[in-house]
Amino acid sequence: MDNALASEVLSLSLEHLEMVIITIAIAAALALPAGVLLARRKGARRWAVGFANIAQTIPSLALFGFLVPLPLIGGIGKRTAIIALCLYALLPILRNTLLGILGVDPAVRESAVAMGMTERQILWEVELPLAAPAIVAGLRLATVATIGTATIAAAIGGGGLGVFIFRGISMVDTPTVLAGALPAAVMAIAADEGLEWIERKLSPA
Amino acid sequence: MSESPILEIRGLSCSLGERVVLREISLDAAPGETIVLLGRSGSGKTTLLKTVNGLIAPTAGEILFEGRPEREWDAIQLRRRMGYVIQDAGLFPHWTVGANVGLVPRLEGWAPERIAARVDELLAAVGLPPGEFRGRYPRELSGGQKQRVGIARALAADPPLLLFDEPFAALDPITRQELQQLFLELRRTVGKTALFVTHDIREAMLLASRIALLHDGALELLATPREFLNAGTGEARAFLAGLTETWRQDG
Ligand SMILES: Nc1ncnc2c1ncn2[C@@H]1O[C@H](COP(=O)(O)OP(=O)(O)OP(=O)(O)O)[C@@H](O)[C@H]1O
Ligand SMILES: [Mg+2]
């Protein structure tokens, strides 16, 4: 019995983790390049950040609900859950990438131009390294939030640790709720600490 | 002036926003010459260097570098042929001293061993023992050491023209004097052409082949230090008054 519980905790934790990793990978693949492009474009910036802001204000349970009936991207299951989670993860990554790049000392940027670096070299060798701590901070915020929000994925058949939580709620059984909540909390703390460590490593001072 | 000039500035004007910052400046720099741009704060010295470097586009007139109009140059190539010491050093905070100094040689595709040798040679030349300094980060340097690194970086790829923007302004008098002597020494040994910005009349007298006096964006006077001493224009007198004032205090 205990063994069966332990193995279910493990398998749901792995499922949860997988969902989080896929979400962050997709969100980063979209938000990082978008942040780089938007750092150059003032006009488009307001629209994009505005969109990401609005996406984040939708209550998460409602967002999952909105997505389910949609064609193509909707339906019950993991895919819909990941799409919803991505919408939340976009904003912190996008905003921090933007702030990181825009926060590079203009004198350092100008110095790079004056030395004869190309735009591409300036981006890869100056702006991104100097923005790296801010970008990692964005990934950290997004990851920690996604680990928590992903528990709601179970409501639309997405699996993960939320399965325990919803089961526990319906059975009014606290230990079952904890079987989902505790591993999720541990995962969030570990991600937070780990990424913060990377962030510190990347900071110049 | 038998040799053709490295740099020719012809009728150069420049506006930033609504402001006219440079007014019809004409100026040549012959090979090996140090032109000191002298002027009070806001007179347009930095703007003139930036325009020469292609960071700011002129609104009128033209600049010829090595006999060719700058607008016909590839901006990247042009900048790599000018060693720029930026006001307040402008070092890259995430790179070591060695990486900062070796930047342009690396961009130009030098072999790593050659870059390393060049970096050590230049650090030694600006008075920073390479073994001690090459691995340090800019935040681990004093203001004077940063300036020395900035100078080494500007010299790294052996550019035909040096642009020095108040490289010694923020330093104590003794360090400043050391670096001025270093500059003279480098000029004697490598014979570089330079545009050197300062608002210090003594520094101008010491380093200039010719002094270009900027006032409110216009070139008020272009003269050798000796001629400058006898100049009668308003702004030149204002600077000379400062010079005699310090002499009086010294004596
Ligand atoms: N980006 C800008 N937009 C508008 N005006 C500018 C800009 N940059 C400089 N200026 C103005 O142009 C004038 C010349 O500035 P510049 O930096 O060339 O002076 P400077 O002679 O180098 O002064 P300092 O000795 O203080 O460095 C100043 O009046 C300054 O306010
Ligand atoms: Mg200046």
Image: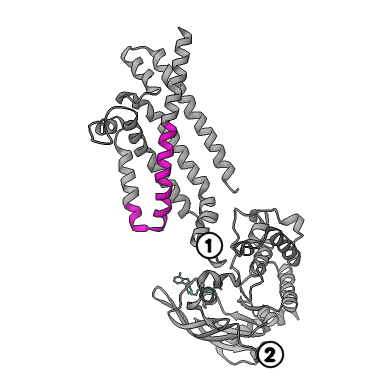
Q: Nearer the viewer, residue B16 or B1?
A: B1
* Residue A196 image offset from top left, x and y in percent: 53, 37
Q: Which residue is at 50% across, 60% downward?
A: A106
Q: Nearer the viewer, mark 2 or mark 1?
A: 1
Image: B15 above or below A205: below
The kind of residue tagged 1 is Ala
Q: Which colour scheme is used?
A: one colour
Q: Which residue is at 57% across, 46% downward?
A: A203
* Residue A37 image offset from top left, x and y in percent: 40, 54
Quadrant position of ligand 2: bottom right
Q: In the rendered structure, does residue A45 fall within the stretch colored magenta?
A: yes
Residue B223, located in which quarter of the rendered image? bottom right
Residue A21, located in which quarter of the rendered image? top left
Which segment is the magenta one? A20-46
The kind of residue tagged 2 is Arg
* Residue B159 image offset from top left, x and y in percent: 64, 73
Image: A126 above or below B200: above
Q: Which type of secondary structure does the marked residue at label 1 adopt?
A: helix
Question: For the residues tagged 2 and 1, is the chain the same?
Answer: no
Name the residue tied to disc 2: B226
Q: Which mark is residue A39?
A: none
* Residue A191 image offset from top left, x and y in percent: 50, 32
> Most prominent secondary structure in the magenta stretch?
helix
Pointer 2 indicates a residue of which chain? B
Name the residue tied to disc 1: A107
Circles 2 and 1 in contact, beta carbons < 8 Å: no
Residue B4, located in which quarter of the rendered image? bottom right
Pointer 1 indicates a residue of which chain? A
Q: Nearer the viewer, residue B191 or B151?
A: B191
The answer for how far apart the CA atoms under marks 2 and 1 are is 36 Å
Q: Can residue B55 be seen in this view?
A: yes
Q: Which type of secondary structure does the marked residue at label 2 adopt?
A: helix
